[in-house]
Amino acid sequence: MSPGSSAPQVQPSCLGLWREENDRLVRQWRQVVAQDSGQPLKQQAAHHALEQFRGLLHRLQGLPSALSVLPLELTVLANTLTLGVGLAQRFMKDHASDIQQGLERVLNAQGVPLPQSGDLWKIIFQSPFLPSEMLCPLHHLVGLQGAIWLTDNHPGDLTMLLCTVMNSQYKESGVPLPELTEDLLSLLSVWDPPAEELDAPLTLQDARSLKEVLLTAAAFHQGLREFHAGNLPLALSSLQKAAFGLCPRPVLAQVHTALGACHRKMGHPQRALLHLLEALKAGAGQGPPLLEAARLYRQLGHTTAELDSLKLLVEALSIPHSSRPPLFPIGVELVITPPSSASSLYCGTQSQAKHLLASRCLQTGRNEEAVEQYLDLLASLLDGPLTRKLWLRQGEPRLRPALSSAPSLSGNPSEHLFCLLWASAAHLLQGQAHAGLGARREALEEFSRCLDLLFRMQPLHRDVDQGAGGNVDQGLSGDVISSHEDEFPSEVCLPMKILQRLKSVTLISRGLEWVAEGQDARALRDFLLGVQVCPGDRNASLHLLHVLWRLERKEEAVALYQRLEAQANQQQEDSEGFLPQYLESFMNWIRITDQESFMQELRKSLQRHPCP
């Protein structure tokens, strides 16, 4: 007895009616697409069609699974998923669960018990009782499953599935099986989904169309992985394959931006520039190519062109991001996920771009322009939607009330902390810009404003701001800072470490201005607080040592000098590693450029004038 022979037989009239309903829905949807109606009408029609497909699928799956019905059932499942993914503009867990349920019904129809664990795809394709009519809808589901895995960054799962599928294909055809590689792009290239028969149920998107989508998306993903791994020739090869695939304009812009970054790192600036121009011509998502152009010009030493690119980046990020309309059929855009903050294609927010522009103006000696840019950045932070919620009012020295009054920000303390750190950083960098212009009074005011914000923030872990410097905050803010480890998630640990470093850097920066003003006593207080706030900061200790010696407090200077000498050969904590990239310029401002020469000078001075 063949598998499924004992299953209830579906009346041909019912099967024919269901088939007609599927084909009618597909034809109606094709007419909607052909009419090129507006997005609201198309979206409304898509919702209506999706509900009808779901109703048909529910009726089919309400019966015991049967081999005679499964080709239609799997086709309806694929059509339902195609519309559902297009409307949602992404793949979801429910879509993977729907495919899993479809595979389980195939096994039930074959009389195969469901395994406790294992690859259902492999069991199905290795079955000797697989009707040829089911191959086309199964390959269709293979394409949809592959899109889900690529979106979830699981290319290895798709590689194994394609090996299983092609092993089955060659076995049935009797053609000798070629040596299969584990390279996903090669497997996708040789994957040959069967063509739809003329009398088969109609589909909204066939397996061969999905294959081209997967091939382009996989080439793009693989190119980015190789690029971030430093394998530039392999990255270039994969990205070029993506560029010649089914690339809509937004994806083409990303591909050319990645190719430009690849050529820049390979030392081909002209080729990089050509690809970045192509990315800009695509007209979508101009932020990433503009940022990459700024990197290229900086590498070439073309400062003016670099700053111009950053200004264009700020303007590009000021344009509101329009929502993407539903995509029908499934395209490459839905399989390519938005770049993460670690990706070379991530261009950040407008505030980050403004900060980068201001920072580069300061680093290249354009101090007046840097001041203007920092003022613009500070104004944008003050005028932003977080100003009631994130700025600490007089008499509210703790961070907790500000957090509890901001339910609209999803209750994420890390976001609040980073915004406060950015505001503090703006004051600090503005102060450094004023100092560079010789405007010491303005610089001191900005440093003091920064410290006022920083010392009002409440540390969340005892080992961050307490310990050696635990009483420093009390002296400056007039409020004892306590730990609330049970009230905040662990994700705020990083910003609090940045807070620790920012306090030290700002105190040192203000202390240097006091030194320039000839007020060594005030400078001493700031340097001492800097050491207490961040005990591992060698810069603060060196500045403190210098001013102690100048104030003739030689016993204290000798004790600090001996401690620094004892630590010189020990592995020091990399406290600067707590600073993110956008804060790197702080360290150049306060660092004693030749620490060894400074220590030697003090050593000789001690020999000439030993302490009693």
Image: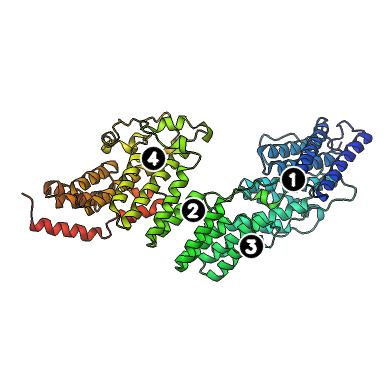
Residue at image position (41%, 44%) is 423
The three-letter amino acid code for the residue at tag 2 is Ala
Q: Earlier in the sequence, mark 1 or mark 3?
A: 1
Residue 76 in the image, given as x and y percentages of width and height: 81, 40
Circle 2 sits on which residue? 353
The label on residue 4 is: none
Q: CA distance from mark 4 to mark 2?
A: 23 Å
The label on residue 281 is: 3
Q: Nearer the viewer, mark 4 or mark 2?
A: 2
Circle 4 sits on which residue? 496
Circle 1 sits on which residue? 39
Q: Earlier in the sequence, mark 4 or mark 2?
A: 2
Q: Looking at the image, can residue 140 be seen?
A: yes
Q: Nearer the viewer, residue 66 or 345?
A: 345
Mark 2 is surrounded, within 10 Å at the Cα level, by few (under 14), some (14 to 19) or many (20 or more) other residues, namely: many
Left or right for 505, reference 75: left
Contact, mark 1 vs mark 4 (Cβ under 8 Å)? no
The three-letter amino acid code for the residue at tag 3 is Lys
Residue at image position (71%, 53%) is 213
Left or right for 59, reference 228: right
Q: CA distance from mark 3 to mark 2?
A: 21 Å
Vertical relation: 54 (above or below) 542:
above
Q: Earlier in the sequence, mark 3 or mark 2?
A: 3
Furthest-right residue in this view? 13
Mark 1 is surrounded, within 10 Å at the Cα level, by few (under 14), some (14 to 19) or many (20 or more) other residues, namely: few
Q: Earlier in the sequence, mark 4 or mark 3?
A: 3
Element assignment for label 4: helix
Q: Earlier in the sequence, mark 1 or mark 4?
A: 1
Q: Earlier in the sequence, mark 1 or mark 2?
A: 1
Q: CA distance from mark 1 to mark 2?
A: 33 Å
